[in-house]
Amino acid sequence: MNYEKTFEEIYNELLNREDRGSVADYIPELANVDPDQFGVCLTTVKREEFSYGDAEKRFSIQSIAKVLSFVMAYSSIKSNIWERTNLEPAGTPFNSLLQLEHDRGIPRNPFINAGALVICDILVSELASPKENIRAFIRRLSGNNTVDFNPAVAHAEKKAGSRNYAMIYLMKSFGNIRNDIETVMDLYCHLCAIEMSCKELSGTFLFLANNGVVPWSGERILSPSRTKRTNALMQTCGFYDEAGQFTFKVGLPGKSGVGGGIVAIHPEKYAIAVWSPRLNKKGNSYKGMLFLEEFTTKTRLSIF
């Protein structure tokens, strides 16, 4: 299949549709991104790579990184994650305090903000140098030792993080945060500030399409069973309260971020990353969602 030709065809078709989204504006580093940039890259489990547009341009991956922090905890830390976070779709905004209060400080899943904060708390408890350890982990998955945090974005995340602070203090009151709040928030803000390109993202997430094994190194990150469960969690919880729409229209496990990126997985076939900075009202890439819907429709390469 000529993926690059398919990418170009879909992109040109979408040029005729109004991009009704808008860039995230709560921090300057996201608000100032050129909203018309677009990139896509697909990497197969056989290590074939196909890209189009701004596929090598790095951007802030934001909540996409929550999958990687979760995998790090799920793969190597002997802690019962499921006592501290649930695994159900939220059905409410990703930063809901109402739901967190109702559930007595237990987040609905690891991919909403509260859940990712709990995962960061677990990593702080278990790792000697959490920021350095998670950066090294992501570099290992990507095979690229230049992947890094953007310190300006991390600082801005913290400065704009009043609601996240409210959530972490609420969870602390219920005993579900065990470490110093500033330490956990610092890790969380740096996690969201990781910058990668579509090429790097599709390669990084390829282990989830390959039964938990990084294809180019042979390193096993997750067991087949835990790989299945991680993909299932992305399917049901990867797009906040738009996960049902993504499943219905695209038909792949995936994860989005307010930097405009989306990563999706087809088990045993490929990982695909798409980037378009304008977001819809749910906080997901407006054009990225449309692109992936058209891609799986044209290629018939969804899991359904």
Image (cartoon, rainbow, N blue to C red):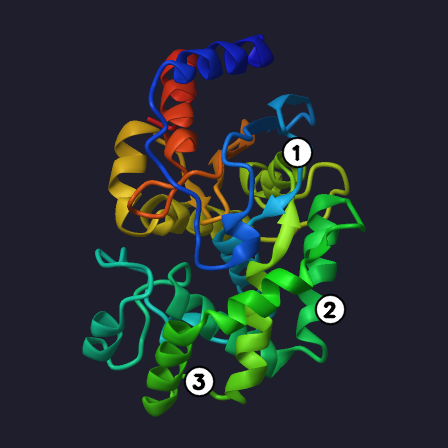
Q: Which residue is mark 3?
A: 177
Q: Are marks 3 and 2 in contact (CB under 8 Å)?
A: no
Query: On the rendered image, what quadrant is the C terminus found in?
Result: top left
- Residue 295 placement (x, y as % from top left): 43, 19
Q: Is residue 139 left or right of residue 169?
A: right
Q: Earlier in the sequence, mark 1 or mark 3?
A: 3
Q: Amino acid at mark 3?
A: Ile
Q: Earlier in the sequence, mark 1 or mark 2?
A: 2
Residue that appears at 41% across and 63% down: 110
Q: Amino acid at mark 1?
A: Lys
Q: Residues within 10 Å of mark 2 (few under 14, many from 20)?
A: few
Q: Which residue is mark 2?
A: 132
Mark 1: which secondary structure? helix
Mark 2: which secondary structure? helix
Question: Which residue occupies the foreground of this view, 178 or 304?
Answer: 178
Q: Give the CA separation, mark 1 to mark 3.
A: 35 Å
- Residue 42 placement (x, y as % from top left): 59, 26
Residue that appears at 35% across and 29% down: 250
Q: Give the CA separation, mark 3 to mark 2.
A: 21 Å
Q: Earlier in the sequence, mark 3 or mark 2?
A: 2
* Residue sitting at the far right: 145
Q: Which residue is mark 1?
A: 199
Question: As displayed, is residue 126 above or below residue 214?
Answer: below
Residue 126's label in the rendered image is none
Query: On the rendered image, what quadrant is the N terminus found in?
Result: top right
- Residue 157 placement (x, y as % from top left): 52, 66
Observer able to see residue 300: no
